Image: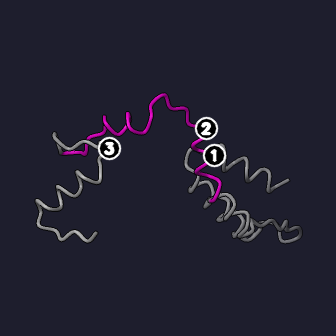
Amino acid sequence: MKQCSNTAFIHSSNNKTTAIWTIINNESKPSKSTTQRETSYLSPNDLNKYFCDVGEHIANDTQSTHSAEEFLSTVKLNGSSSFFFQPTTPEEIGTILVKRNFILVT
């Protein structure tokens, strides 16, 4: 029951890392009641499973109407008015490296 509650708390949190640490800290504190102590643990496997699956869950929960290429073409780095993320080709990278006097190993 408590494990389900912890899992729901993590999944519903906007900051998953903070939620996990909140649970860890709450579980590691000594119980206020010395006569009745409930033992509940998040196992390492539970944490591993969460961190292995969280990316997929976020990707599935995030609805995007743009492709990665469309999104990156609109992103600019802070402080730069000319740098945009755009797809490139191996030939373009080779040209840049030659201009910068890098030695190409093929």
Q: Tell me the tag on residue 57.
A: 1
Q: What secondary structure is marked by label 2?
A: helix
In the image, what residue type sits under mark 3?
Pro
Specify the segment rendered in magenta.
Answer: 52-79
Which of the marked residues, 3 or 1, is nearer the chain's N terminus? 1
The residue nearer to you, when weighing 13 against 79, is 79
65 within the magenta span: yes
Q: Residue furthest top?
A: 65
Q: Residue at x 22, y 58 (%)?
A: 94
Q: Position of residue 3 (x, y in %)?
A: 79, 56
Mark 2 — residue?
Answer: 61
Q: What secondary structure is marked by label 1?
A: helix
In the image, what residue type sits under mark 1?
His
Q: CA distance from mark 3 to mark 2?
A: 26 Å
Q: Is residue 80 left or right of residue 57?
A: left
Q: CA distance from mark 3 to mark 1?
A: 27 Å
For label 2, the crowd category at 10 Å Cα-Cα, with few meaning under 14, some 14 to 19 and many 20 or more, is: few
Mark 3 — residue?
Answer: 87
Q: Position of residue 44 (x, y in %)?
A: 71, 70
The residue nearer to you, when weighing 26 against 60, is 60
Seen in the picture, residue 66 relative to 9 is either above or below; the reply is above
The residue nearer to you, when weighing 20 against 75, is 75
Seen in the picture, residue 43 relative to 4 is either above or below; the reply is below
Q: Is the C-beta separation of discs 2 and 1 under 8 Å?
A: yes
